[in-house]
Image (cartoon, rainbow, N blue to C red):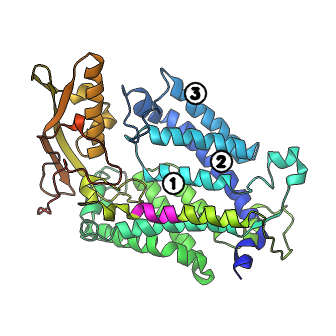
Protein backbone atom coordinates (compact mmCIF):
# COMPACT_ATOMS: atom_id res chain seq x y z
CA UNK A 1 0.00 0.00 0.00
CA UNK A 2 2.79 2.39 0.97
CA UNK A 3 4.76 1.62 -2.19
CA UNK A 4 1.65 2.06 -4.33
CA UNK A 5 0.95 5.44 -2.78
CA UNK A 6 4.43 6.91 -3.26
CA UNK A 7 5.90 5.04 -6.21
CA UNK A 8 2.95 4.53 -8.53
CA UNK A 9 3.64 6.28 -11.85
CA UNK A 10 1.29 9.09 -12.85
CA UNK A 11 1.21 11.49 -15.80
CA UNK A 12 3.93 14.12 -15.35
CA UNK A 13 1.89 16.95 -16.91
CA UNK A 14 1.46 18.88 -13.60
CA UNK A 15 5.21 18.90 -12.96
CA UNK A 16 6.07 19.90 -16.55
CA UNK A 17 3.60 22.79 -16.55
CA UNK A 18 4.71 23.87 -13.07
CA UNK A 19 8.37 23.91 -14.20
CA UNK A 20 7.55 26.38 -16.96
CA UNK A 21 5.47 28.62 -14.68
CA UNK A 22 8.07 28.37 -11.93
CA UNK A 23 10.87 29.36 -14.33
CA UNK A 24 8.87 32.32 -15.62
CA UNK A 25 8.03 33.54 -12.12
CA UNK A 26 11.59 33.35 -10.80
CA UNK A 27 12.70 35.20 -13.95
CA UNK A 28 10.22 37.96 -13.13
CA UNK A 29 11.46 37.96 -9.52
CA UNK A 30 15.10 38.34 -10.55
CA UNK A 31 14.62 40.92 -13.30
CA UNK A 32 11.86 42.72 -11.41
CA UNK A 33 14.21 43.25 -8.48
CA UNK A 34 16.42 45.30 -10.80
CA UNK A 35 13.74 47.40 -12.48
CA UNK A 36 11.68 48.11 -9.34
CA UNK A 37 14.76 49.45 -7.55
CA UNK A 38 14.84 46.61 -5.00
CA UNK A 39 18.46 45.75 -5.78
CA UNK A 40 19.53 49.38 -5.53
CA UNK A 41 17.71 50.10 -2.25
CA UNK A 42 18.55 46.80 -0.57
CA UNK A 43 22.02 45.86 -1.76
CA UNK A 44 23.74 48.82 -3.45
CA UNK A 45 22.80 51.93 -1.45
CA UNK A 46 23.55 50.61 2.08
CA UNK A 47 27.13 50.92 3.32
CA UNK A 48 26.78 47.42 4.80
CA UNK A 49 24.03 44.84 5.09
CA UNK A 50 22.53 43.06 8.07
CA UNK A 51 23.14 39.49 7.00
CA UNK A 52 21.82 36.42 8.81
CA UNK A 53 24.04 36.00 11.87
CA UNK A 54 26.87 33.62 10.99
CA UNK A 55 26.85 34.58 7.31
CA UNK A 56 29.16 37.58 7.54
CA UNK A 57 31.14 36.29 4.55
CA UNK A 58 28.15 37.04 2.31
CA UNK A 59 28.48 40.63 1.16
CA UNK A 60 27.06 42.48 -1.88
CA UNK A 61 29.33 42.79 -4.88
CA UNK A 62 30.98 46.22 -5.19
CA UNK A 63 29.75 49.04 -7.42
CA UNK A 64 26.97 47.82 -9.74
CA UNK A 65 27.95 44.17 -9.41
CA UNK A 66 24.60 43.14 -7.93
CA UNK A 67 22.83 44.24 -11.11
CA UNK A 68 24.89 41.71 -13.06
CA UNK A 69 24.30 39.16 -10.29
CA UNK A 70 20.50 39.43 -10.64
CA UNK A 71 20.70 39.56 -14.44
CA UNK A 72 22.60 36.26 -14.36
CA UNK A 73 19.91 34.81 -12.09
CA UNK A 74 17.42 35.89 -14.73
CA UNK A 75 19.34 33.93 -17.38
CA UNK A 76 19.40 30.81 -15.21
CA UNK A 77 15.67 31.12 -14.52
CA UNK A 78 14.89 31.22 -18.25
CA UNK A 79 17.00 28.08 -18.65
CA UNK A 80 14.87 26.46 -15.93
CA UNK A 81 11.69 27.50 -17.73
CA UNK A 82 12.71 25.91 -21.04
CA UNK A 83 14.37 22.97 -19.31
CA UNK A 84 17.89 23.54 -20.61
CA UNK A 85 20.63 22.02 -18.44
CA UNK A 86 17.84 21.93 -15.88
CA UNK A 87 19.67 20.58 -12.84
CA UNK A 88 22.67 22.87 -13.35
CA UNK A 89 20.70 26.01 -14.14
CA UNK A 90 18.34 25.52 -11.19
CA UNK A 91 21.29 24.62 -8.96
CA UNK A 92 23.04 27.85 -9.94
CA UNK A 93 19.90 29.92 -9.37
CA UNK A 94 19.32 28.26 -5.99
CA UNK A 95 22.87 28.99 -4.87
CA UNK A 96 22.62 32.62 -5.96
CA UNK A 97 19.18 33.10 -4.41
CA UNK A 98 20.41 31.58 -1.15
CA UNK A 99 23.25 34.08 -1.22
CA UNK A 100 20.84 37.00 -1.57
CA UNK A 101 18.50 35.58 1.08
CA UNK A 102 21.16 35.12 3.76
CA UNK A 103 23.02 38.30 2.75
CA UNK A 104 20.42 40.77 4.02
CA UNK A 105 17.46 41.11 6.37
CA UNK A 106 16.23 44.61 5.50
CA UNK A 107 13.77 43.08 3.02
CA UNK A 108 13.05 39.88 4.88
CA UNK A 109 9.96 38.07 3.67
CA UNK A 110 8.68 34.57 4.39
CA UNK A 111 8.06 34.17 0.68
CA UNK A 112 11.76 34.54 -0.05
CA UNK A 113 12.37 31.60 2.27
CA UNK A 114 9.62 29.61 0.55
CA UNK A 115 11.24 30.26 -2.83
CA UNK A 116 14.53 28.89 -1.51
CA UNK A 117 12.79 25.71 -0.31
CA UNK A 118 10.95 25.32 -3.61
CA UNK A 119 14.21 25.59 -5.50
CA UNK A 120 15.68 22.81 -3.36
CA UNK A 121 12.61 20.60 -3.89
CA UNK A 122 12.46 21.25 -7.63
CA UNK A 123 16.10 20.20 -7.95
CA UNK A 124 15.07 16.72 -6.79
CA UNK A 125 12.20 16.42 -9.28
CA UNK A 126 12.42 15.14 -12.89
CA UNK A 127 10.77 18.27 -14.27
CA UNK A 128 12.81 18.28 -17.50
CA UNK A 129 11.69 14.90 -18.84
CA UNK A 130 9.11 16.32 -21.23
CA UNK A 131 8.78 19.48 -23.35
CA UNK A 132 12.26 20.66 -22.53
CA UNK A 133 15.48 21.59 -24.26
CA UNK A 134 17.15 18.72 -22.43
CA UNK A 135 14.79 16.24 -24.12
CA UNK A 136 15.42 17.92 -27.48
CA UNK A 137 19.18 17.38 -27.19
CA UNK A 138 18.89 14.00 -25.47
CA UNK A 139 15.64 12.24 -26.46
CA UNK A 140 16.48 9.18 -24.37
CA UNK A 141 15.54 10.99 -21.14
CA UNK A 142 11.98 11.70 -22.30
CA UNK A 143 9.30 10.41 -19.93
CA UNK A 144 5.52 10.64 -19.90
CA UNK A 145 5.20 9.84 -16.22
CA UNK A 146 6.66 10.47 -12.77
CA UNK A 147 6.35 8.84 -9.34
CA UNK A 148 3.42 10.08 -7.29
CA UNK A 149 5.77 11.33 -4.57
CA UNK A 150 6.79 14.16 -6.91
CA UNK A 151 3.41 15.77 -6.39
CA UNK A 152 3.33 15.00 -2.69
CA UNK A 153 6.63 16.74 -2.01
CA UNK A 154 5.05 20.01 -3.13
CA UNK A 155 1.71 19.31 -1.44
CA UNK A 156 3.38 18.57 1.91
CA UNK A 157 5.46 21.73 1.73
CA UNK A 158 2.38 23.81 0.92
CA UNK A 159 0.43 22.19 3.78
CA UNK A 160 3.18 23.04 6.27
CA UNK A 161 3.27 26.67 5.16
CA UNK A 162 -0.50 27.17 5.34
CA UNK A 163 -0.98 25.26 8.59
CA UNK A 164 1.68 27.14 10.52
CA UNK A 165 0.44 30.43 9.06
CA UNK A 166 -3.03 29.62 10.45
CA UNK A 167 -1.72 28.57 13.87
CA UNK A 168 0.31 31.78 14.15
CA UNK A 169 -2.88 33.83 13.68
CA UNK A 170 -4.51 32.28 16.74
CA UNK A 171 -3.45 34.99 19.16
CA UNK A 172 -5.37 37.92 20.71
CA UNK A 173 -4.10 40.77 18.53
CA UNK A 174 -5.19 38.98 15.35
CA UNK A 175 -8.47 37.69 16.75
CA UNK A 176 -9.57 41.10 18.06
CA UNK A 177 -8.82 42.59 14.60
CA UNK A 178 -6.07 44.93 15.85
CA UNK A 179 -3.44 43.65 13.43
CA UNK A 180 -5.71 43.67 10.39
CA UNK A 181 -6.85 47.21 11.18
CA UNK A 182 -3.24 48.37 11.34
CA UNK A 183 -2.41 46.59 8.08
CA UNK A 184 -5.35 48.24 6.31
CA UNK A 185 -4.66 51.79 7.52
CA UNK A 186 -1.72 52.07 5.13
CA UNK A 187 -4.02 51.03 2.24
CA UNK A 188 -6.48 53.90 2.79
CA UNK A 189 -5.35 55.81 -0.30
CA UNK A 190 -5.83 52.86 -2.66
CA UNK A 191 -8.04 53.74 -5.61
CA UNK A 192 -11.59 52.33 -5.43
CA UNK A 193 -10.98 49.93 -2.51
CA UNK A 194 -9.13 52.16 -0.03
CA UNK A 195 -12.19 53.21 1.97
CA UNK A 196 -13.71 49.75 1.79
CA UNK A 197 -10.61 48.29 3.42
CA UNK A 198 -11.19 50.51 6.47
CA UNK A 199 -14.57 48.94 7.27
CA UNK A 200 -14.85 46.84 10.43
CA UNK A 201 -16.75 44.05 8.71
CA UNK A 202 -13.97 43.83 6.10
CA UNK A 203 -11.38 43.50 8.89
CA UNK A 204 -13.47 40.73 10.45
CA UNK A 205 -13.76 38.95 7.12
CA UNK A 206 -10.01 39.22 6.41
CA UNK A 207 -9.01 38.04 9.89
CA UNK A 208 -11.27 35.01 10.16
CA UNK A 209 -11.45 33.97 6.53
CA UNK A 210 -7.64 34.11 6.55
CA UNK A 211 -7.50 31.58 9.38
CA UNK A 212 -10.11 29.37 7.75
CA UNK A 213 -8.40 29.52 4.36
CA UNK A 214 -4.97 28.63 5.76
CA UNK A 215 -6.31 25.71 7.80
CA UNK A 216 -8.65 24.26 5.18
CA UNK A 217 -7.35 25.01 1.70
CA UNK A 218 -5.08 21.98 1.35
CA UNK A 219 -7.67 19.43 2.63
CA UNK A 220 -10.36 21.01 0.43
CA UNK A 221 -8.12 20.88 -2.64
CA UNK A 222 -7.30 17.24 -1.94
CA UNK A 223 -10.99 16.28 -1.60
CA UNK A 224 -12.42 15.96 -5.10
CA UNK A 225 -16.01 17.18 -4.37
CA UNK A 226 -14.70 20.48 -2.94
CA UNK A 227 -11.65 20.90 -5.19
CA UNK A 228 -13.10 23.32 -7.74
CA UNK A 229 -14.66 25.54 -5.07
CA UNK A 230 -11.39 25.58 -3.15
CA UNK A 231 -9.57 26.55 -6.33
CA UNK A 232 -11.95 29.49 -6.92
CA UNK A 233 -11.40 30.52 -3.29
CA UNK A 234 -7.64 30.36 -3.91
CA UNK A 235 -7.96 32.63 -6.93
CA UNK A 236 -9.85 35.23 -4.90
CA UNK A 237 -7.55 34.94 -1.88
CA UNK A 238 -4.28 35.24 -3.80
CA UNK A 239 -5.42 37.95 -6.19
CA UNK A 240 -6.64 39.94 -3.17
CA UNK A 241 -3.20 39.55 -1.59
CA UNK A 242 -1.53 40.57 -4.83
CA UNK A 243 -3.59 43.75 -5.19
CA UNK A 244 -3.69 44.80 -1.52
CA UNK A 245 -0.29 43.74 -0.23
CA UNK A 246 1.71 43.84 -3.49
CA UNK A 247 3.93 40.88 -2.60
CA UNK A 248 5.37 40.15 -6.02
CA UNK A 249 5.24 36.74 -7.66
CA UNK A 250 4.09 34.71 -4.69
CA UNK A 251 0.31 34.87 -5.04
CA UNK A 252 0.79 33.50 -8.56
CA UNK A 253 3.25 30.86 -7.37
CA UNK A 254 0.64 29.79 -4.81
CA UNK A 255 -1.97 29.47 -7.54
CA UNK A 256 0.47 27.37 -9.56
CA UNK A 257 0.68 24.91 -6.65
CA UNK A 258 -2.92 23.96 -7.41
CA UNK A 259 -1.67 22.04 -10.47
CA UNK A 260 -0.58 19.21 -8.16
CA UNK A 261 -4.03 18.83 -6.58
CA UNK A 262 -5.95 18.18 -9.79
CA UNK A 263 -5.92 14.88 -11.66
CA UNK A 264 -2.81 14.71 -13.88
CA UNK A 265 -4.91 13.73 -16.86
CA UNK A 266 -7.01 16.88 -16.45
CA UNK A 267 -3.87 19.03 -16.44
CA UNK A 268 -2.62 17.24 -19.56
CA UNK A 269 -5.89 17.86 -21.44
CA UNK A 270 -5.94 21.52 -20.42
CA UNK A 271 -2.31 22.54 -20.96
CA UNK A 272 -0.56 19.81 -22.98
CA UNK A 273 -3.12 18.59 -25.49
CA UNK A 274 -0.48 17.17 -27.84
CA UNK A 275 1.16 15.14 -25.08
CA UNK A 276 0.67 11.40 -25.35
CA UNK A 277 -1.48 10.26 -22.39
CA UNK A 278 0.18 8.03 -19.81
CA UNK A 279 -2.04 4.96 -19.44
CA UNK A 280 0.21 2.33 -17.84
CA UNK A 281 -0.47 1.38 -14.21
CA UNK A 282 3.11 0.90 -13.07
CA UNK A 283 4.66 0.83 -9.62
CA UNK A 284 8.40 1.33 -9.96
CA UNK A 285 10.42 1.05 -6.77
CA UNK A 286 13.62 3.04 -6.98
CA UNK A 287 16.89 1.50 -5.86
CA UNK A 288 17.35 4.69 -3.83
CA UNK A 289 14.10 4.17 -1.93
CA UNK A 290 15.72 3.90 1.52
CA UNK A 291 17.90 6.98 1.05
CA UNK A 292 14.92 8.87 -0.41
CA UNK A 293 12.74 8.06 2.61
CA UNK A 294 15.45 8.96 5.11
CA UNK A 295 16.35 12.27 3.47
CA UNK A 296 12.71 13.17 2.86
CA UNK A 297 11.78 12.26 6.43
CA UNK A 298 14.59 14.40 7.85
CA UNK A 299 13.68 17.33 5.61
CA UNK A 300 10.03 17.40 6.64
CA UNK A 301 10.88 16.76 10.29
CA UNK A 302 13.04 19.89 10.15
CA UNK A 303 10.25 21.81 8.43
CA UNK A 304 7.83 20.78 11.15
CA UNK A 305 10.27 21.58 13.96
CA UNK A 306 11.62 25.01 12.94
CA UNK A 307 8.31 26.90 13.36
CA UNK A 308 7.94 25.48 16.88
CA UNK A 309 11.26 26.65 18.27
CA UNK A 310 9.99 29.96 19.64
CA UNK A 311 7.85 28.01 22.14
CA UNK A 312 11.08 26.83 23.74
CA UNK A 313 12.62 30.29 23.95
CA UNK A 314 11.77 32.61 26.83
CA UNK A 315 9.32 35.51 26.33
CA UNK A 316 6.98 36.51 23.51
CA UNK A 317 8.24 36.04 19.95
CA UNK A 318 6.29 39.15 18.85
CA UNK A 319 8.52 41.17 21.15
CA UNK A 320 11.92 39.46 21.03
CA UNK A 321 11.73 38.22 17.38
CA UNK A 322 13.61 35.12 18.59
CA UNK A 323 12.32 32.21 16.52
CA UNK A 324 10.34 34.49 14.20
CA UNK A 325 12.19 33.80 10.97
CA UNK A 326 11.71 30.53 9.06
CA UNK A 327 8.43 30.01 10.93
CA UNK A 328 5.69 31.17 8.53
CA UNK A 329 4.67 34.00 10.85
CA UNK A 330 3.30 36.25 8.12
CA UNK A 331 1.91 39.79 8.56
CA UNK A 332 1.21 39.25 12.24
CA UNK A 333 2.34 42.46 13.87
CA UNK A 334 3.01 46.14 13.43
CA UNK A 335 6.07 47.52 15.22
CA UNK A 336 7.71 50.89 15.47
CA UNK A 337 10.29 52.34 17.80
CA UNK A 338 13.26 54.59 18.45
CA UNK A 339 16.73 53.89 19.76
CA UNK A 340 19.91 55.65 20.89
CA UNK A 341 23.39 54.08 20.63
CA UNK A 342 26.31 55.28 22.74
CA UNK A 343 29.94 54.22 22.29
CA UNK A 344 32.22 54.33 25.34
CA UNK A 345 35.96 54.40 24.72
CA UNK A 346 37.58 52.06 27.21
CA UNK A 347 40.90 53.90 27.31
CA UNK A 348 39.46 57.26 28.31
CA UNK A 349 35.88 56.59 29.39
CA UNK A 350 34.69 59.15 26.88
CA UNK A 351 31.14 58.56 25.67
CA UNK A 352 30.04 59.36 22.11
CA UNK A 353 26.40 59.40 21.02
CA UNK A 354 26.08 57.68 17.63
CA UNK A 355 23.83 59.06 14.92
CA UNK A 356 22.83 55.75 13.40
CA UNK A 357 21.03 57.54 10.58
CA UNK A 358 24.45 58.34 9.10
CA UNK A 359 25.19 54.61 8.85
CA UNK A 360 21.92 53.12 7.65
CA UNK A 361 19.68 53.21 4.60
CA UNK A 362 15.99 54.05 4.76
CA UNK A 363 15.05 50.36 4.75
CA UNK A 364 17.52 49.56 7.51
CA UNK A 365 16.26 52.44 9.66
CA UNK A 366 12.80 50.88 9.65
CA UNK A 367 14.03 47.86 11.59
CA UNK A 368 17.00 49.09 13.64
CA UNK A 369 14.89 50.09 16.63
CA UNK A 370 12.61 47.04 16.82
CA UNK A 371 14.66 43.92 16.09
CA UNK A 372 17.12 42.83 18.82
CA UNK A 373 19.30 40.75 16.49
CA UNK A 374 19.78 43.76 14.19
CA UNK A 375 20.52 45.99 17.17
CA UNK A 376 23.17 43.51 18.32
CA UNK A 377 24.67 43.36 14.83
CA UNK A 378 24.89 47.15 14.63
CA UNK A 379 26.72 47.18 17.98
CA UNK A 380 29.19 44.64 16.58
CA UNK A 381 29.63 46.82 13.49
CA UNK A 382 30.46 49.84 15.64
CA UNK A 383 32.91 47.75 17.65
CA UNK A 384 34.74 46.69 14.47
CA UNK A 385 34.73 50.24 13.09
CA UNK A 386 36.43 51.62 16.18
CA UNK A 387 38.80 48.64 16.38
CA UNK A 388 39.99 49.49 12.86
CA UNK A 389 41.01 52.87 14.25
CA UNK A 390 42.85 51.22 17.15
CA UNK A 391 40.23 51.98 19.79
CA UNK A 392 38.55 49.41 22.04
CA UNK A 393 34.98 50.37 22.89
CA UNK A 394 31.81 49.31 24.64
CA UNK A 395 28.45 49.86 22.94
CA UNK A 396 25.29 50.65 24.89
CA UNK A 397 21.69 51.31 23.96
CA UNK A 398 20.88 54.10 26.41
CA UNK A 399 17.34 54.70 25.25
CA UNK A 400 14.93 52.47 23.37
CA UNK A 401 11.18 52.18 23.09
CA UNK A 402 8.98 49.98 20.93
CA UNK A 403 5.27 49.99 20.13
CA UNK A 404 3.70 46.63 19.18
CA UNK A 405 0.21 46.45 17.67
CA UNK A 406 -1.07 49.72 19.17
CA UNK A 407 0.15 48.85 22.66
CA UNK A 408 1.78 51.45 24.85
CA UNK A 409 5.46 51.96 24.11
CA UNK A 410 7.81 49.81 26.18
CA UNK A 411 11.61 49.84 26.63
CA UNK A 412 13.34 47.12 24.60
CA UNK A 413 17.06 46.98 25.45
CA UNK A 414 18.62 47.18 28.91
CA UNK A 415 20.85 50.29 28.98
CA UNK A 416 23.58 48.90 31.26
CA UNK A 417 24.60 46.00 28.97
CA UNK A 418 27.66 46.29 26.71
CA UNK A 419 26.26 44.77 23.51
CA UNK A 420 29.71 44.76 21.92
CA UNK A 421 30.81 42.21 24.51
CA UNK A 422 27.71 40.01 24.32
CA UNK A 423 27.70 36.77 22.31
CA UNK A 424 24.68 35.85 20.20
CA UNK A 425 22.70 32.73 21.14
CA UNK A 426 20.83 31.12 18.26
CA UNK A 427 18.40 29.00 20.29
CA UNK A 428 18.46 30.91 23.55
CA UNK A 429 16.85 34.07 24.88
CA UNK A 430 19.02 37.16 25.13
CA UNK A 431 18.72 38.45 28.69
CA UNK A 432 19.57 42.03 27.68
CA UNK A 433 16.10 42.33 26.15
CA UNK A 434 13.53 43.74 28.54
CA UNK A 435 10.63 41.31 29.19
CA UNK A 436 7.39 41.85 27.30
CA UNK A 437 4.51 43.39 29.25
CA UNK A 438 0.93 43.07 28.09
CA UNK A 439 0.13 46.76 28.36
CA UNK A 440 -3.31 48.06 27.46
CA UNK A 441 -3.85 49.16 23.87
For marks 2 and 1 on the same chain, the one whose residue lies earlier in the sequence: 2
Residue 302 colored magenta? yes
Q: Magenta span: helix, strand or loop, mainly?
A: helix
Give the extent of the magenta segment. 301-307
Give the class, few, some or many, for how many residues have Cα within 10 Å of label 1's Cα (few <14, many ≥20).
some
Q: Quadrant of residue 208?
A: bottom left
Q: From the viewer's perspective, is 322 left or right of 8?
A: left
Quadrant into which the N terminus falls: bottom right
Spot occupied by residue 204 in the image (x, y as percentages of width and height): 30, 71
Q: Residue furthest right?
A: 140
Discs 2/1, front? 1
The answer to whether residue 404 is above or below residue 93 is below
Q: Locate residue 330, reporting x and y percent.
A: 38, 58
Q: Residue furthest front?
A: 347
Q: CA distance from mark 1 to mark 3?
A: 24 Å
Please say if the residues under marks 2 and 1 sit with CB atoms less than 8 Å apart. Answer: no
Q: Which residue is mark 1?
A: 114
| Residue 23: numbered disc | 2
The foreground one among 244 and 368 is 368
Residue at the spot of label 3:
68
- Crowding near pointer 3: few (<14 within 10 Å), some, many (20+)? few
Residue in the picture at 74% in, 72% down: 7
Residue 403, horizontal then vertical, whole percent? 18, 51
Q: Residue furthest top?
A: 389
Depicted 36 relative to depicted 86: above or below: above
Dot 3 or dot 2: first in sequence order is: 2
Amino acid sequence: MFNKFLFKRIDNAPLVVFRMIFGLLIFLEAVGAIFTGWVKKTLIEPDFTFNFIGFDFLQPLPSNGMYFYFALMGVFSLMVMIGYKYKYSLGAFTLMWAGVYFMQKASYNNHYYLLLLLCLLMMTLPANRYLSADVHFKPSIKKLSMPRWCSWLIIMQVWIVYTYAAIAKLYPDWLDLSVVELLMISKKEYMLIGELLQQKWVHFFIAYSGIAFDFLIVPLLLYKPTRKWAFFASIFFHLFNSVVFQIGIFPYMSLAFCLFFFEPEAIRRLFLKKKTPYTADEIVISSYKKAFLIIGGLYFALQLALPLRHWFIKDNVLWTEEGHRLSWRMMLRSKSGYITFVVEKKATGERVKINHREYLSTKQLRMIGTKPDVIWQFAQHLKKEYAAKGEEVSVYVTNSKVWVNNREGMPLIKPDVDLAAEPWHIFKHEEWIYPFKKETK
